[in-house]
Image: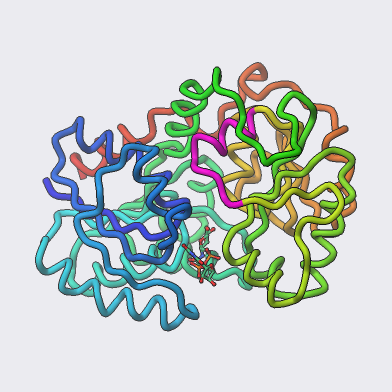
Amino acid sequence: MRVLSVVGARPQFVKLAPVAAAFGAAGIDHVIVHTGQHYDAVMSDAFFEDLHIPAPDVHLGIGSANHGAQTGAMLAAMDDVLLTHRPDWVLVYGDTNSTLAGALSAVKLHLRVAHLEAGLRSFNRRMPEEHNRVLTDHAADLLLAPTQVAMGHLAAEGLADRARLVGDVMTDVCFLVRDAVRDRPAELPTGVDPASPYVVATIHRADNTDDPQRLAAIVEALGAVPVPVVLLAHPRLRARAAEFGLDLSRGSVHATDPLPYPQMVRAVMGSAGVVTDSGGLQKEAFLLGVPCTTVRTETEWTETVDLGWNVLDPGLTRVPDLAARAKPVAPEGAGAAPYGDGKAAQRVADELLSA
Ligand code: UD1
């Protein structure tokens, strides 16, 4: 059986790693298509190297543009790729413009589509990711859901018969990497002592980066944290800050480039807490037993909030006290494993082989 994976942005490379390994073990002929949505070495190539992902078979080289132009360019390029490789399944991941383009181009050619990380909802229709999730779920033939909550959302939209609970492949990769890096020192920017409390922060969502006052307020709140803040600056954040004449390194903030995945996991493991607007990092903080403050009005990963590990703080009032916040009972100790057992990718392979 041949499966063609479409990936393009950083979180998709992380999800692809355990899936590619499971497909290899299951003898699935796996074609990897990289749209080129993320193209910088630190945003793309480093993930393939560090997570031992086979090099893409096809690279579309689309790059950045506004949403319509970026998604449209991917659609235009995908027809030839799909007609050349004729896969039994097209597998799309998560919620980016590459996800939607992969799903749409496949259904137009009557190829079967499976959506990994199906059923997540923020119910915030301002987010491009929310449009991508809803449209991809309704186009796909097989919905591979990470959580019971996601299964509930799919059922509420009339999609229960196509949905399968497989667990979260990000748990697979997070636990493997955690065990591999446990004995390594955290690599932090000069001036941040890994032996003393520090916070890891990421901000990249358009709602937070694209308004000068909002971005200034976020940097101000991070600067007021009483311990060093390692701000892993996404290219969008750097670009907007430069445009607005805003210095990211103010107060406690040490702005630095995004880290390779293993180093990011190690930095989070050693931290006193995480401040983020990323979906993936909220969950990684939870899986690694670190408290998180999320700079958004809502989250797709509601279990992290319900279990006491994550606080939603769009008003930025809770950011400065993060490092002092008491940790709740460890999720594993409390028997809560809403994101699966670290074997989700194997179930993805099984579902595709049996469907
Ligand atoms: C995308 C996803 C988002 C995901 C995020 C992870 C969509 C709609 N959004 O957002 O869901 O959480 O990736 O990072 O698909 N840029 C570079 N180098 C790169 C990549 C991007 O400089 O390697 C710059 C681009 O020029 C652009 C900005 O970063 O100005 C945003 O990139 P884009 O891929 O459009 O969206 P993200 O904000 O990364």
Residue 239: horizontal and vertical position, in percent?
Answer: 62, 70
For this rendering, which residue is in front, 214 or 326?
A: 214
Of the 4 image quadrants, the one containing the N terminus is: top left
- On the question of residue 155 being in view, the answer is no
Residue occupying the point 74% across, 48% down: 254
In magenta, the rendered stretch is 257-269
Residue 193: horizontal and vertical position, in percent?
Answer: 75, 30
Most common SS among magenta residues? helix
Q: Is residue 262 magenta?
A: yes
282 to 75, vertically: above or below: above
For this rendering, which residue is in front, 263 or 115?
A: 263
Q: Is residue 211 magenta?
A: no
Please identify the quarter of the rendering in which residue 89 is found: bottom left
Residue 306: horizontal and vertical position, in percent?
Answer: 72, 38
Coloring basis for residues: rainbow
- In the picture provided, is 347 more to the left or to the right than 324? left
Please identify the quarter of the rendering in which residue 326 is found: top right
318 to 90, vertically: above or below: above
Task: Please count the marks in the image.
Answer: 0
Residue occupying the point 70% across, 42% down: 200
Outermost bottom residue:
69
- On the question of residue 111 being in view, the answer is yes
Please identify the quarter of the rendering in which residue 135 is found: bottom left
Residue 346: horizontal and vertical position, in percent?
Answer: 30, 32
Of the 4 image quadrants, the one containing the C terminus is: top left
334 to 201, vertically: above or below: above
Residue occupying the point 39% across, 76% down: 71
Outermost front residue:
190
